Image (cartoon, rainbow, N blue to C red):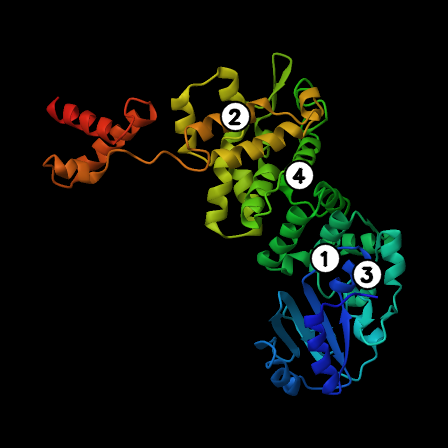
Amino acid sequence: MIKIPESIEKVFTVLFEHGAYPLIVGGFVRDHFLKKQSKDIDIEVYGINSLKKLQKALEELAPVHEVGKNFGVLKMDYDGYDLDISLPRTERKTGKGHTGFEVQTNGQLDFKTAAKRRDFTMNAIGYDTRSGYFIDPYEGQKDIKEGIIRHINDDTFIEDPLRVLRAVQFSARFNFKLDTNTLKLCQHMIKEKMLDELPSERIFEEYKKLLLKANKPSLGFELLDKMNGLYPELKELQGVEQDKTYHPEGDVWVHTMMSIDAMAELRTTDNKRDIILMLATLCHDFGKVEATELVDGKIRSIGHENILKPSQTFIQRLSDEKALLEEIEPLIKEHLMPSALFKQKSKDPAIRRLSTRVNIENLVLVASADHFGRTTKDAKAKKYEAGEWLLARAKKLKIKNTQPEPFLLGRHLINEGMKPGLEFKVILKEAYENQLDGKIRGEKSAINWLKKYLNT
């Protein structure tokens, strides 16, 4: 039996009182068998054909919102749980995109017919809270036990091409194998370019789940490769050789897959931050495709960190959010710096200047993933001395997550009798450069520097 929180039982009581026959369906039931916690509960309501009265009754418990014209879906946030309450329905594809469906709700449908529209057998299990029985017309429990992702029906599956990417992220998150026939169907859908009709935001959501929830995101990308569904920027990494001294693990593709798995172990639990770190790690060596060459008998990729176009193209496939790209690009461009600065035993000015270009703590995480994404001795030992050194120095300088605040400000110039103008910018910039070099160490030092500057 599934243990239902006492507060959520109140929702079911209201449904029962109105003559409804509710079943819990979808991911909450699946996650029960996977022994995973979930705060999302989908409830399918049988025995009635309208949710209007239920909505009014449920609003005594919490605010309820109806979503999707003709979909018959109510949403409510109750006691920390996100509830989707809907009527059983059938769907028929009428056009391209995720809105190109004709939906028919019918509270009198049998569960097997209603569940036919779902993607995979593991997501088509219903749970009757009153009897404690599971309704499993497509043997989803068996597939969960055997670790298999299997689609329910060819015709209904291809109606939503996003299901290809759902298969990918589920496979990586649960370490499940994709059924042979499901794999063939996904390959067919990709070959027929069915995914091209999907808006980028829906695609990005599935990539996020893969990158943020899977312990080994590489499993998802390897499956996507089997489907012939990799974007070119990823596919082109395959076969790009690397110097075996630094990369005994293999080509750039192998290294990238190992790196994103390493980054998955370093995730911070802040999803907004983690997606930036994961994408930066995924893209960090895209430039090697263009930069790699044989120099004096050795494989070199000089300047690959500065070749940003492939990363820009890849990120823009997923999102048009400029801020996302602005956060990722510096991490790619600077990912070699922790090791370089450590090797050079760089002084404070170099570290201060680095902090003006990139968040040092985030950079160390990406550089660590890059370091651990290989089979060298120190990588296997999970020790990255350069990163630890740089982080300690940045912490001491109080620039781990920020750049130095300028000591000299416009008000100081005004206090010296200057009037605001173009010269302000020139003076403040030069003062800040001196501050980064350690020649200006505080506000008093900055004022003294200004007086000397003005009297020169």
User: Image height check: is 169 above or below 415?
Assistant: below
Q: Give the left or right position of residue 351, taking residue 367 as reference.
A: left
User: Image height check: is 373 above or below 297?
Assistant: below
**Residue bearing mark 1:** 37
Decide which of tag 3 and tag 4 comes sooner along the chain.
3
Q: Secondary structure at mark 1?
A: loop
Disc on res. 122 = 3
Decide which of tag 2 and tag 3 comes sooner along the chain.
3
**Residue bearing mark 4:** 265
Instruction: Report crowding for label 1: few under 14, some 14 to 19, many 20 or more residues within 10 A (C-alpha).
Output: few
Quadrant in which residue 246 is drawn: top right
Contact, CB < 8 Å: mark 1 with mark 2? no
Contact, CB < 8 Å: mark 2 with mark 3? no
Amino acid type shown at disc 2: Pro
In the image, 72 versus 51, the foreground residue is 51
Q: Residue at x 67, y 57 (%)?
A: 195
Q: Position of residue 382 (x, y in %)?
A: 67, 27
In the rendered image, the quadrant that contains the C terminus is: top left
Decide which of tag 2 and tag 4 comes sooner along the chain.
4
Instruction: Report crowding for label 3: few under 14, some 14 to 19, many 20 or more residues within 10 A (C-alpha).
Output: many
Amino acid type shown at disc 3: Met
Tell me if residue 338 can be seen.
yes
Q: Residue furthest front?
A: 6
Amino acid type shown at disc 1: Gln
**Residue bearing mark 2:** 338
